[in-house]
């Protein structure tokens, strides 16, 4: 049976294309049923047109870009989603829904046929054609573009227009997740031949008004947007405020109306005003303890298991993240994900077992440095909790706090014991491929498992959904049992906003409504 994504199947929740591996957004205990994300109460009345808002993200610099292929931080992703549209877009469960594409079809998950909506215009008034899509996809493969998505785009063997609104994409091998991959911001569509990104010419909800790298971006409503009645706002200004306290202060003073990356410790202060609200987006974000399997003593299996049992997951969830987190189980697929394996035995805090394992390995009295940094969310506090737990059983861990600047180039994966931080990914395949495949550049613990690699490749093109889910369950089990990664919790993304801003809801690929807030919100001032 072929996979067909049309407007009807998209509205029904991907009826025929339910095989995409997506980041989940529910909350559950170990093995428990997943709940839906908590969103602010639904606003009363229809959306209003008009108004201007100011949005603060975590950073801005001279590296700010209008090229979707080069986006590297949340401010870039938000800017690009204001100005451009993609073939597909992710919904609240991170399932791909049709956007610029009117239909996406495949019979073998290798060759895909795409038909575009009619009458879609770029900001310069030109009509969107299949050649624009071909150019937008293939430019990622050009080394000169320096696309952040080149590794992903390399699986595109060929893309060619077969009509003014139709094209064919052939992959190097079957991948059921292509519609979800195309929904990520790097694959937003630009006009054929575009090489100058000093300005922006997209099909997105807003047109560029002002762009000053490192300072601000101002956009105004696109009157010819392909979604009837949208966007609702007249204008959006996007700025960067790196310091979290300053970002929250700007919100509470009224200087800005929406901010991302709010520390859980700030949420009570925000809510106390009565004029602001919190948006929790339960996601696949995690900070992990990395034990290099190619070093000693971290390569000893008893050491690895002992450290995993020293992670006090519930303490980390409550004390570090004020409950804005879900319990993890040393594998990267969070509770609520369609492919999450709920039957995997939950690893618990067990210092007696840790002591036994370390003593058996002759490592009980070992002294080992552990590197943490604010660059890996919560890792400094996690390291302190681990240090205290280790001291109680006779192991000495020395916490080395490294500055955020340069941590990932200088320390991450460079020592036997470090911490990392992994953002949500749109598909399970991407997550496993980037961080656990034997030859992955970001294989943090240097774990190599040929059977894992084989199952991962097979799952990518598996047509039977039940079988595919089983394969991803097997992959989780292998990571849980064999890798040198400890994942104590999955961290919620927390935004804060002025209560007069309506239409806010979570999309678990990132904060700011999956960086797509401009398509949905309105001002009710």
Image: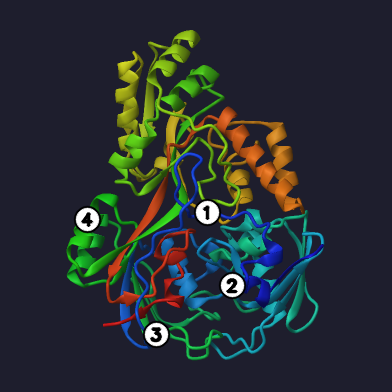
Nearer to us of marks 4 and 3 is 3
Crowding near pointer 2: few (<14 within 10 Å), some, many (20+)? many
Give the mark nearest the N terminus, 2 or 1. Answer: 1
Q: First in sequence: mark 3 or mark 2?
A: 3
* Residue 268: mark in rendering: 4
> Which residue is the extreme one toward the front?
33
Determine the secondary structure under disc 2. Answer: loop
Q: Residues within 10 Å of mark 4 (few under 14, many from 20)?
A: few
- Residue at 38% x, 28% y is 370
Does the CB distance between marks 4 and 3 fall below 8 Å?
no
Query: Is residue 64 among what the camera can see?
Result: no
Q: Residue at label 2?
A: 86
SS class, disc 3:
loop
Q: Residue at x 34, y 80 (%)?
A: 44
In percent of width and height, residue 266 lies at 23, 54
Is 470 left, or right, of 71 in this rendering?
Answer: right
User: Which residue corresponds to mark 1?
Assistant: 24
Marks 1/4 in contact by CB < 8 Å: the verdict is no
């Amino acid at each position: 049976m072929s996979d067909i994504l049309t407007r009807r199947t998209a509205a029904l929740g991907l009826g025929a294309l339910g095989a995409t591996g997506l980041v989940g957004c529910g909350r559950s205990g170990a093995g428990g049923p997943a709940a839906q994300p908590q969103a602010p109460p639904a606003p009363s009345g229809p959306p209003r047109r008009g108004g201007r808002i100011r949005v603060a993200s975590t950073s801005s610099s001279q590296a700010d870009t209008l090229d979707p292929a080069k986006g590297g931080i949340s401010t870039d992703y938000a800017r690009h989603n204001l100005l451009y549209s993609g073939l597909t877009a992710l919904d609240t469960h991170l399932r791909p829904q049709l956007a610029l594409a009117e239909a996406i079809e495949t019979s073998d998950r290798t060759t895909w046929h795409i038909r575009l909506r009619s009458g879609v215009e770029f900001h310069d008034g030109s009509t969107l054609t299949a050649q624009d899509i071909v150019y937008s996809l293939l430019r990622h493969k050009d080394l000169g573009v320096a696309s952040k998505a080149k590794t992903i785009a390399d699986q595109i063997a060929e893309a060619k227009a077969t009509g003014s609104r139709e094209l064919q994409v052939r992959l190097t091998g079957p991948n059921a997740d292509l519609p979800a991959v195309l929904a990520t911001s790097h694959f937003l569509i630009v006009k054929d031949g575009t090489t100058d990104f000093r300005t922006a010419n997209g099909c997105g909800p807003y047109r560029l008004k002002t762009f000053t790298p490192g300072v601000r971006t101002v956009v105004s409503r696109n009157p010819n947007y392909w979604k009837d009645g949208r966007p609702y706002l007249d204008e959006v200004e996007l700025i960067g405020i790196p310091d979290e306290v300053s970002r929250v202060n700007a919100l509470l003073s009224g200087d800005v109306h929406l901010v991302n990356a709010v520390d859980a410790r700030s949420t009570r202060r925000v809510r106390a005003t009565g004029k602001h609200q919190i948006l929790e987006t339960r996601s696949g974000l995690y900070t992990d303890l990395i034990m290099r399997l190619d070093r000693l003593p971290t390569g000893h299996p008893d050491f690895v298991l002992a450290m995993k049992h020293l992670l006090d997951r519930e303490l980390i969830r409550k004390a570090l993240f004020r409950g804005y987190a879900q319990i993890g189980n040393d594998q990267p697929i969070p509770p609520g994900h369609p492919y999450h394996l709920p039957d995997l035995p939950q690893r618990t805090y067990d210092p007696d077992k840790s002591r036994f394992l370390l003593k058996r390995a002759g490592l009980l009295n070992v002294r080992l440095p552990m590197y943490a940094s604010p660059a890996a969310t919560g890792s400094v506090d996690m390291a302190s909790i681990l240090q205290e737990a280790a001291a109680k059983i006779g192991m000495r861990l020395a916490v080395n706090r490294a500055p955020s600047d340069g941590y990932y180039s200088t320390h991450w994966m460079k020592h036997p014991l470090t911490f990392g931080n992994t953002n949500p990914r749109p598909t399970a395949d991407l997550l496993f491929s980037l961080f656990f495949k034997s030859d992955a550049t970001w294989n943090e613990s240097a774990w190599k498992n040929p059977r894992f690699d084989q199952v991962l490749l097979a799952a990518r093109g598996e047509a039977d959904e039940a079988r595919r889910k089983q394969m991803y369950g097997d992959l989780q089990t292998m990571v849980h049992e064999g890798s040198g990664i400890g994942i104590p919790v999955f961290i919620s993304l927390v935004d804060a906003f002025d209560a007069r801003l309506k239409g806010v809801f979570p999309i678990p690929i990132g904060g700011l409504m999956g960086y797509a807030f401009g398509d949905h919100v309105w001002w009710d001032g």
